[in-house]
């Protein structure tokens, strides 16, 4: 079905209706329809907003005059809330079209998520709405909330548990209504405030991009949170992320479907390693978005970022009134890409009067510090001094059960509000520390409840910080040479690499025994012989690679064996590629994957025959800058091996970055022809980088 983008202004109108009709309204608050009405009554609406309950069997609903049909409403209807079962919705949708309703919030389930019949019904609903000039949110959604417009058009149960709408700067668009409700509920618990929250459901009409675009433009929204299962228009999504980055508005994302269970077989290692989530992650990272594993981690980070906090480096200051608590926090940093900060001498001098010369180090044991309910307490002074240290990029405070917990929370909140760096409060005292929890909530400072949660927040902030965003690579302007369609054999792939300045091992193709002899004289020994084929992809799996050929006789024997092997496979003989045998210190993989939605991607990682076992690889959108290439390499688990290990020569990092930049430029130049390309292995040999094998595929004609 053809999609129809919604502008920010169109979405703004949806989120600021002047009148709403609730189709299927009920007095029974045990039902979704009654619950919806109860929330409206509890939280109220703007004085100028008209509310029209629709129920053919009732004259009043919860004290409000009810109408039998939407067409009976005395005034215009901007928004209709559809709460009827699917099989009873057709007539109501006809009435909405007749009435000229601008937007329909289809809470109703049983559409595309329920199978083919539901999909067809969903398409018919949207087509009918478009024909009448209406837009649809959902179906199968939980509605939306706009706190600054006093609009509670949602079935989220948290609305029944609160008395005051949690107004604030965090905007949410979610493909899961339940998870939108989870984030709202958790936000209420920790003091987060929201601008607009939208459950997009099946995205039958308006999708996550439409609401992302609105939240980026919305002056009431300072931080955007997205829960995503599917991106319907990847190119538009990438443009919107770039827009948010340019405007300095943080976008935080949880993406479901990070694993690739049941993935179909693919023809190259790069394609299998560059799965859907890996590509999505690379696009988000390039655009400066923050990625999280859970919605709760994302929400807690949103509250931190809403204070304007910026993590300046990977060094974290740790505070606790418990030595064990400090040890736990330091342990949690292991493997997270962060480290315990080292304080400068000037900071130690500031701390010494409070902690003594031996205590003026990290982690800081705050047990001896005084926290007072007002004023600039010693605890606040110590935390503030540490957070001002340029060696400190962020901080975390763990509060266990201890005396004066409310005063401790006040001191941390005061210091955290003054610093421009993130200072995360871990409230590990459960209900014993309720007074501290209430203070952190009322001041909207927020808290997490475990060291793991704190590190999840800081790790996401640090991961975003580490990837270079400025100085984006310029797209190459040279036109790419025309490539043959389908699978490229190794000689063609090698020639493509060499044309873009990427070195390969010396090689020749022999079609005859006589050409083998000539190649031996040219290349010398030892040598490798590989069958050339556009049919057989993984040659080593079929015995089509012969190594350590030490003389002419061995090469001729290998030639004959490879020719017979190709005949045995029923594949055409396309020759034998003869290449120098290179002593390898370490094997990398470098490759290209052109995604239909997000475009060309660059991959680098640990290579060789076990490439898919170790799964040590990183992706980036092509083209990349040298700094971005270095950030990819720095993320690899194999980095110590590239830096020289047990007497092996180290890789020239500038050379490796330059090679990756060239490969990314090749990806961009050939993005309309290539689908994927592998260099595996890209060998490190005595400090030299050289491609020993290459394969590529293009779009079939």
Image (spheres, rainbow, N blue to C red):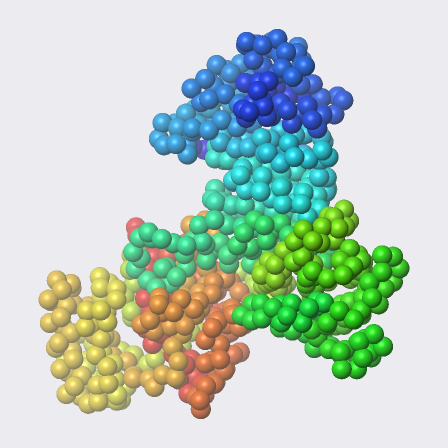
Q: Dividing the picture into quarters, in which one does residue 326 lie?
A: bottom right
Q: Looking at the image, is 279 positioned above or below residue 510?
A: above
Q: Residue at x 30, y 59 (%)?
A: 267
Residue 214: image x %, image y %?
A: 64, 39
Q: Dividing the picture into quarters, in which one does residue 64 lie?
A: top right
Residue 566: image x %, image y %?
A: 14, 68
Q: Which quadrant of the rendered structure holds the N terminus?
A: top left
**403 sits to left or right of 664:** right
Q: How many marks?
A: 0
Question: From where the camera sits, is residue 209 visible?
Answer: no
**Residue sitting nearer the eye, 61 or 310:** 61
Residue 231: image x %, image y %?
A: 49, 44
**Residue sitting nearer the eye, 269 or 49:** 49
Q: Residue at x 24, y 85 (%)?
A: 548
**Residue sitting nearer the eye, 113 or 591:** 113
Question: From where the camera sits, is residue 30 visible?
Answer: yes
Q: Residue furthest right?
A: 375
Q: Looking at the image, is 82 positioned above or below residue 656?
A: above
**194 sits to left or right of 412:** left
Q: Residue at x 71, y 35 (%)?
A: 165
Q: Looking at the image, is 435 positioned above or below residue 73?
A: below
Residue 527: image x %, image y %?
A: 25, 84
Q: Looking at the image, is 90 positioned above or below residue 520?
A: above
Q: Residue at x 43, y 83 (%)?
A: 688
**673 sits to left or right of 165:** left
């Amino acid at each position: 079905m053809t999609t129809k983008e919604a502008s920010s202004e169109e979405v703004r109108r949806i989120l600021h209706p002047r009148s709403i009709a609730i189709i299927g309204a009920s007095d029974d608050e045990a039902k979704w329809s009654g619950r919806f009405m109860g929330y409206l009554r509890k939280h109220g609406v703007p004085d100028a907003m008209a509310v029209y309950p629709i129920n053919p069997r009732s004259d009043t609903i919860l004290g409000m005059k009810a109408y039998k049909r939407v067409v009976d409403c005395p005034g215009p209807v901007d928004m209709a809330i559809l709460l009827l079962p699917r099989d009873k919705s057709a007539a109501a949708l006809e009435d909405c079209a007749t009435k000229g309703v601008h937007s329909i919030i289809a809470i109703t389930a049983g559409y595309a998520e329920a199978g083919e019949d539901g999909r067809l019904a969903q398409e018919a609903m949207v087509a009918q709405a478009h024909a009448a000039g209406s837009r649809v949110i959902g179906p199968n959604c939980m509605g939306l909330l706009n706190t600054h417009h006093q609009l509670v058009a949602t079935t989220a149960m948290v609305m029944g548990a609160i008395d005051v709408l949690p107004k604030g700067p965090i905007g949410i668009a979610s493909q899961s209504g339940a998870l939108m409700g989870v984030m709202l509920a958790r936000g209420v618990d920790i003091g987060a405030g929201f601008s607009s929250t939208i459950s997009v459901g099946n995205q039958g009409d308006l999708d996550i991009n439409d609401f992302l675009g609105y939240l980026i433009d919305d002056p009431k929204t300072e931080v955007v949170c997205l829960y995503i299962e599917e991106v319907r228009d990847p190119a538009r999504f990438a443009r919107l992320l770039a827009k948010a980055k340019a405007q300095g508005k943080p976008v935080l994302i949880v993406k479901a479907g990070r694993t690739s269970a049941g993935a179909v077989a693919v023809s190259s290692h790069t394609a299998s390693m560059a799965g859907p989530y890996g590509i999505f992650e690379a696009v988000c990272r390039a655009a400066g978005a923050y990625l999280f594993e859970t919605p709760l981690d994302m929400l807690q980070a949103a509250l931190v970022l809403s204070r304007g906090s910026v993590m300046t480096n990977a060094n974290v200051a740790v505070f606790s009134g418990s030595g064990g608590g400090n040890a736990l926090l330091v342990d949690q940093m292991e493997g997270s890409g962060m480290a315990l900060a080292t304080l400068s001498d000037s900071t130690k001098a500031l701390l010494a009067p409070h902690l003594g010369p031996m205590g003026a180090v990290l982690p800081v044991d705050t047990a001896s510090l005084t926290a007072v309910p007002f004023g600039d307490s010693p605890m606040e002074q110590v935390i503030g001094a540490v957070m001002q240290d340029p060696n400190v990029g962020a901080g975390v405070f763990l509060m266990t059960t201890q005396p004066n917990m409310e005063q401790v929370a006040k001191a941390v909140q005061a210091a955290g509000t003054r610093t421009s760096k993130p200072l995360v409060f871990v409230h590990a005292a459960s209900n014993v520390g309720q007074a501290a929890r209430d203070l952190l909530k009322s001041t909207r400072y927020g808290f997490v409840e475990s060291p793991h949660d704190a590190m999840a927040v800081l790790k996401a902030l640090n991961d975003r910080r580490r990837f270079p965003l400025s100085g984006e690579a310029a797209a190459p302007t040279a036109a790419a040479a025309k490539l043959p369609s389908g699978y490229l054999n190794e000689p063609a792939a090698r020639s493509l690499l060499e044309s873009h300045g990427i070195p390969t091992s010396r090689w020749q193709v022999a079609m005859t025994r006589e050409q083998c002899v000539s190649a031996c004289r040219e290349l010398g020994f030892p040598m490798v012989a590989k069958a050339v084929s556009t049919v057989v992809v993984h040659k080593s799996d079929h015995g089509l690679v012969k190594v350590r050929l030490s003389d002419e006789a061995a090469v001729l024997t290998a030639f004959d064996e490879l020719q017979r092997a190709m005949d045995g496979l029923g594949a055409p003989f396309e020759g034998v590629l003869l290449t120098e045998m290179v002593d390898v210190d370490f094997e990398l993989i470098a490759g290209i994957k052109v995604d239909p939605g997000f475009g060309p991607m660059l991959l680098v990682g640990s290579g060789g025959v076990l490439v898919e076992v170790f799964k040590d690889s990183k992706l980036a959108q092509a083209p990349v800058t040298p700094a971005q290439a270095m950030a990819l390499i720095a993320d690899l688990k194999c980095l110590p091996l590239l830096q020289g290990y047990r007497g092996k020569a180290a890789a020239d990092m500038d050379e490796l970055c330059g090679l990756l930049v060239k490969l990314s430029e090749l990806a961009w130049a050939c993005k309309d022809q290539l689908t994927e390309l592998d260099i595996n292995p890209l060998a490190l040999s005595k400090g030299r980088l050289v491609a020993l094998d290459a394969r590529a595929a293009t779009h079939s004609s």
